[in-house]
């Protein structure tokens, strides 16, 4: 098992190198440059070129890439932002933690709303606990996060004035943005859990359990749930990726100083160090989460575990 | 069953409880009142040289730092700020400046050394080449006197005096010891009425400088909060969490006005949206090189319609490059002296006929190329482009509207790779800035290349007028010269002004705001309502 | 644990002394969906004496599994409905009991072994746990060690090394899995074991082993058994009494001798025997019964076998046949039932 984990962590290295290369390549191809974006109109072309030259922006992109990677590995230096001239890593880290907080809160909410309702709907199939949440989920799965955010903004903030519209001062500030990004995945989780449950309930071993005299509640909780939740775990882990992206929208709308909005902002300035550092951090987070999901899966499902451990008694 | 319901209820209850507790966000602690202001994104830097966004400059260029001159938008000119007195030599090449008795926020007195130092720093920055390139040297004659030598007479140096802010040399040098960057944290290196205590991704905090040479401001504490989304800002204003709301989005103006009552004002913005007509465009056999065609285009533009479409009616049709109300030396269309155009389809059609096109040609449609602009479909310029497209169609000219991001459109405009372009310019306080558009040395800044080898225009004359304009310091003389220049430009029909946008500001009943300017507000002039 | 009359011991369940272990009377079961009604079991009578094994024979779709599920009331909740009839377990009508009592009976007094061992076990729990679960459920006052001991005992009983109880189902072969299922079914020493085609999914050699094991356990524990199968060979080896089921009805029943050796038979039974290939004689073609079982959503009037019967008469299509009785042998066919001896009504 440990070998498997170590191998996956080692995979992070080519991932990071790849991400960096891709971003540099893309930045190289797309139009625009920091000088122009920062200095704006009213500055001559020479001055813009001089500015870019000073930043090291005009070097060929492979050279920039190699330089960046070298700095990253040997000096743990993620570069200086072209825009604010601050150390990219220092600039990003606090914002990154905020986005993570938001994204994880979103994952948590989407799981806690979607999964229990999904279980309930499967157990009470065709009855009220099934039909009403199903209809709502059907509608909400299609509503984009920013629409939800806007509606919540107007209702809770403009009309009722019970929640703040910007910032990150207290827990209150996280509620709306977290809900906004959590609701579409929650609807997905609901439908996915329900179908997984229904499939598990049909399995023969459930009939065996009932034939043993296991009370119905225990049949669900002990026999069905463990099997049904396996694919749901993977789904929830994957949704973290969606949520980190969704967090960008929420960050913009609710003025949350997260890394998503930072990256988007800096793309216009072609602030390569910040963009790369931010993206790498997100990639690391995502990879680690998928690793945890896989390990959890193996932990719960003995058939998968056997594949990884390959130990015979 | 029960577990599901109880879980849900628990969640709802928790949310309600947490939402309920807390003070509803007006920042109303006992003790000092804090002025609530808005930033749209985190402050870029506390160094005036590094701030390029208008919201940031409003803080660093007005509250924190000061230059030799201040800017008086309402009256279109500059006024003495850190320069107590300015004497110009006969030949206009030497400026002798006597400094105010001012102190920096760190307590040190303002000395000539600080001014010399600051101008050195500004000269190193290519962004300010435009205002520093003609300054040969800056010397400290004594503690309180600075002498500047120019390469040639330039009355537009007033703009330089406004632009270049004065650092405390001691503090700046200390902060940058060891290769560190200045401006990444709060500091006391300016002379302005407010000290920037600190800033981060959520906002910035200012505190009144009690020993400000101009007298301590009434409002002692200011909190700038980052509110990225306009909707959130409107809601914050409604909830009393925002005291001053500048640049109110035009779509929200009515709602905000209703909320603010008397405490709001819509003024003409100090900007200009204009149509650039590239006479060098090869499209359709160089149709735009035909002066009659260009004139037809000028008559065809429906400025009122543009105002309605782009600014919901809050803008004003434009005839000048810079609003004469804000720029003292700008040509004034009310006084005549140059061609002005208003929507006149008959005259436009007449010009087309004179250009050699028939009614049949116009009915069939004459391609004239693309109207490009930057931003996205919702920006005012894009809407103006669409209106102009339909205006052109009325006289038989077919054009496509292309809207893309600045990174793509910018280079095209500055290299004259376009047919028609809607451009927006802002932040012009001295008519000399027209140099950017009409002088051959402004490569990468102008949209029309008047000095091209195929140019039919008397660009040398234009450049001479530009030079004359800065050779004299007399405002009226300058205005005359610029009027002649602008008249010529208007005759070329290459720069066609469209509109000035409207800029609305609103404020809460907690403060008194004596006047509203389109660009820079002065918190030091406001006061709490008692 | 010594064997004694469990029913009397279980306080909630007071059976009637001396009654046959299972007595099904006129059971009707349908599957009801929005679109149609499937008439699965249409009035069957079935009696199993204590300690005896009853073989329920028939083709796929005859209603055998439905009957078995009805005894334990494990029909699918949405669609299965028991319309009428009684199922008397030790004289007590199971259909009147509440769910808690049913749960006390399932796995404890009446156990079931299903057809497909591959999916009958929960893949995420060890086999030891799954057997232990059944034990703990019905013997709550046993200590952990006692439960584990019992698990080991059961595994030994079915021929699996107790050390394998920490392994997962996917680590066992099909035959082994079925043994585990049987161990699970027998661990609480039920009065009645319902085995629904327990060896059909296994290959022939394993089949013999598992059957032998079942027989041995039955003999040792004195368990009554309802053996459902379509294989007459298994019936011959294992069963004391037999019922032949067709389209939801028992068309012939009796002792094993009655079914195998008597002269008179229901035409369907004849067809079943005829279709068994003979090892000794050479045949070029098999002799199946022509036709298919009738559509259970649309059963014919009269005798259900009429369509396929070689000896079909006019009356067979009109009237449902009565039961012809000869001692323990009962045949439901117009060939034998004289009009005056008719019992049971037309449908």
Image: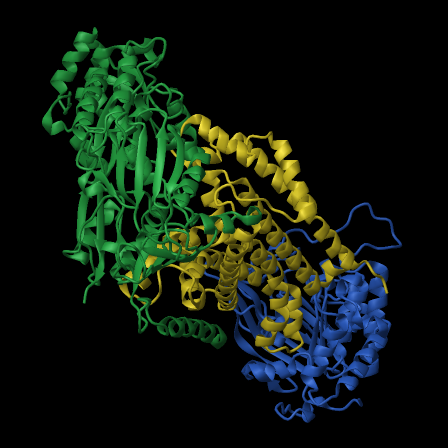
Picture residue at 35% right of the left edge, 23% below the top: B446
Q: Is residue C289 above or below residue B95?
A: below
Can the viewer see residue C21 in this picture?
Answer: no
Q: Is residue B49 above or below residue B493?
A: below
Can the viewer see residue C199 in this picture?
Answer: yes
Q: Position of residue A84 (x, y in %)?
A: 48, 45
Q: Is residue C161 left or right of residue B173?
A: right
Q: Which chain is yellow?
A: A
Q: Which residue is nearer to you in this view: C12 or C331?
A: C12
Residue B459 image-quadrant placement: top left
Q: Which residue is nearer to you in this view: B288 or C281?
A: B288
Q: Is residue B525 above or below residue A68?
A: below
Tell me, what hue is chain B?
green
Picture residue at 56% right of the left edge, 84% below the top: C97
Q: Position of residue A297 (x, y in %)?
A: 67, 60
Residue C147 image-quadrant placement: bottom right
Tell me, what hue is chain C?
blue
Looking at the figure, which quarter contains the C terminus of chain B?
bottom left
């Amino acid at each position: 098992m440990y070998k498997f984990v170590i191998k996956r962590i080692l995979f992070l290295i080519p991932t990071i190198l790849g991400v960096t290369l891709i971003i540099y390549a893309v930045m190289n191809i797309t139009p625009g440059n920091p000088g122009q974006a920062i200095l704006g109109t009213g500055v001559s072309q020479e001055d813009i070129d001089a500015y870019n030259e000073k930043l090291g922006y005009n070097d060929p992109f492979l050279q920039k890439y190699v330089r960046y990677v070298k700095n990253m590995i040997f000096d743990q230096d993620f570069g200086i932002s072209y825009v604010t001239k601050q150390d990219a890593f220092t600039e990003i880290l606090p914002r990154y933690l905020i986005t993570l907080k938001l994204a994880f809160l979103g994952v948590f909410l989407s799981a806690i709303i979607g999964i229990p309702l999904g279980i309930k709907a499967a157990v009470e199939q065709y009855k009220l606990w099934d039909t009403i949440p199903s209809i709502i989920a059907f509608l909400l799965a299609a509503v984009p996060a920013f629409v939800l955010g806007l509606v919540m903004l107007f209702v809770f903030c403009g009309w009722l004035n019970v929640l703040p519209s910007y910032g990150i001062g207290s827990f209150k500030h996280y509620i709306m943005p977290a809900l906004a990004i959590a609701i579409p995945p929650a609807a997905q989780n609901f439908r996915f859990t329900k179908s997984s449950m229904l499939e598990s309930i049909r399995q023969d071993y459930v009939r065996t359990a009932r034939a043993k005299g296991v009370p119905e509640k225990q049949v669900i909780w002990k026999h069905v749930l463990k099997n049904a939740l396996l694919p749901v775990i993977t789904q929830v882990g994957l949704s973290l990726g969606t949520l980190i992206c969704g967090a960008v929208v929420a960050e913009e709308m609710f003025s949350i100083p997260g890394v998503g909005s930072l990256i988007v902002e800096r793309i216009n300035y072609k602030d390569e160090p910040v963009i790369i550092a931010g993206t790498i951090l997100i990639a690391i987070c995502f990879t680690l989460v998928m690793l945890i999901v896989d390990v959890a899966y193996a932990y719960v499902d003995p058939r998968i575990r056997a594949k990884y451990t390959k130990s015979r008694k | 069953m029960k577990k599901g319901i109880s879980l849900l209820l628990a969640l709802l209850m928790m949310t309600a409880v947490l939402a309920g507790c807390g003070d509803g966000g007006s920042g109303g602690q006992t003790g000092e009142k804090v002025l609530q202001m808005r930033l749209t994104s985190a402050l870029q830097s506390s160094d005036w040289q590094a701030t390029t966004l208008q919201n940031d400059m409003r803080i660093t260029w007005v509250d924190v730092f000061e230059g030799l001159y201040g800017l008086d938008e309402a009256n279109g000119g500059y006024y003495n700020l850190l320069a107590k007195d300015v004497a110009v030599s006969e030949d206009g090449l030497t400026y002798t400046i006597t400094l105010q008795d001012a102190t920096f926020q760190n307590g040190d007195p303002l000395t000539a050394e600080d001014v010399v130092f600051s101008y050195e720093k500004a000269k190193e920055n290519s962004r300010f080449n435009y205002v520093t390139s003609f300054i040969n040297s800056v010397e400290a004659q004594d503690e309180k006197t600075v002498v500047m030598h120019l390469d040639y007479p330039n009355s537009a140096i007033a703009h330089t005096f406004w632009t270049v802010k004065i650092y405390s040399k001691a503090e700046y040098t200390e902060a940058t010891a060891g290769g560190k960057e200045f401006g990444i944290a709060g500091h006391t290196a300016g002379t302005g009425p407010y000290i920037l205590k600190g800033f981060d991704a959520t906002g910035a905090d200012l505190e009144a400088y009690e020993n400000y040479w101009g007298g301590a401001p009434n409002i002692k504490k200011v909190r700038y909060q980052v509110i990225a989304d306009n909707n959130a800002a409107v809601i914050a204003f409604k909830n009393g969490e925002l005291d001053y709301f500048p640049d109110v989005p035009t779509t929200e103006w009515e709602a905000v006005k209703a909320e603010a009552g008397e405490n709001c004002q819509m003024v003409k913005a100090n900007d200009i949206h204009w149509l650039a007509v590239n006479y060098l465009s090869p499209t359709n056999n160089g149709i735009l090189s035909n002066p009659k065609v260009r004139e037809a285009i000028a008559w065809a533009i429906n400025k009122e319609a543009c105002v309605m479409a782009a600014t919901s009616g809050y803008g004003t049709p434009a005839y000048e490059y810079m609003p004469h109300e804000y720029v003292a030396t700008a040509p004034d269309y009310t006084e005549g002296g140059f061609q002005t155009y208003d929507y006149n389809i008959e005259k436009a059609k007449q010009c087309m006929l004179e250009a050699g096109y028939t009614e049949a040609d116009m009915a069939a449609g004459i391609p004239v190329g693309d109207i490009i602009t930057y931003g996205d479909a919702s920006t005012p310029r894009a809407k103006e482009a669409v209106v102009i497209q339909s205006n052109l169609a009325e006289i038989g000219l077919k054009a496509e509207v292309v809207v893309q991001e600045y990174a793509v459109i910018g280079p095209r405009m500055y290299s004259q790779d376009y047919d028609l372009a809607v451009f927006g310019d802002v932040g012009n306080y001295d008519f000399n800035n027209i140099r950017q558009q009409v002088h051959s040395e402004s490569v990468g800044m102008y949209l029309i290349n008047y000095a091209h080898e195929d140019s039919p225009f008397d660009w040398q004359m234009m450049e001479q007028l530009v030079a004359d304009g800065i050779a004299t310091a007399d405002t009226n003389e300058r205005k005359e010269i610029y009027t002649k220049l602008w008249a010529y430009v208007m005759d070329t029909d290459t720069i066609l002004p469209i509109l000035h946008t409207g800029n609305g500001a609103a404020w809460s009943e907690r403060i008194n705001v004596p006047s509203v300017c389109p660009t820079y507000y002065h918190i030091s002039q406001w006061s709490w309502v008692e | 644990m010594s064997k004694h009359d469990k029913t009397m011991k279980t306080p909630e369940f007071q059976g009637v002394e001396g009654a046959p272990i299972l007595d099904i009377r006129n059971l009707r079961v349908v599957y009801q969906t929005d679109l149609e009604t499937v008439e699965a079991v249409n009035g069957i009578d079935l009696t199993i004496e204590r300690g005896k094994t009853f073989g329920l024979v028939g083709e796929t779709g005859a209603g055998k599994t439905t009957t078995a599920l009805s005894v334990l009331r494990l029909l699918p909740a949405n669609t299965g409905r028991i319309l009428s009839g009684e199922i008397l377990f030790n004289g007590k009508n199971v259909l009147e009991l509440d769910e808690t009592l049913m749960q006390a009976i399932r796995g404890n007094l009446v156990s079931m072994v299903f057809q497909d061992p591959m999916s009958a076990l929960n893949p995420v729990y060890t086999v030891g746990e799954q057997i232990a679960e059944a034990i703990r459920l019905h013997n709550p006052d046993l200590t952990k060690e006692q439960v584990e001991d019992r698990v080991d005992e059961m595994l030994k009983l079915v021929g699996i090394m107790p050390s394998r109880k920490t392994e997962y189902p996917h680590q066992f072969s099909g035959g082994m899995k079925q043994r585990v299922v049987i161990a699970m079914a027998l661990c609480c020493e039920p009065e009645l074991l319902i085995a629904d085609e327990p060896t059909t999914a296994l290959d022939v050699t394993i089949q013999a082993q598992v059957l032998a094991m079942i027989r041995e356990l039955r003999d040792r524990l004195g368990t009554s058994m309802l053996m459902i199968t379509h294989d007459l060979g298994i019936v011959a080896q294992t069963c004391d009494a037999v019922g032949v089921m067709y389209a939801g009805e028992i068309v012939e029943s009796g002792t094993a001798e009655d079914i195998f050796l008597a002269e008179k038979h229901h035409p369907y039974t004849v067809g079943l025997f005829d279709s068994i290939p003979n090892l000794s004689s050479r045949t070029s073609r098999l002799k199946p019964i022509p036709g298919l079982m009738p559509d259970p959503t649309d059963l014919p009037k009269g005798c259900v076998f009429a369509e396929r019967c070689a000896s079909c008469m006019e009356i067979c299509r009109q009237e449902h046949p009565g039961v012809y009785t000869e001692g323990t042998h009962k045949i439901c066919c117009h060939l034998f039932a004289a009009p005056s001896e008719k019992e049971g009504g037309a449908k």
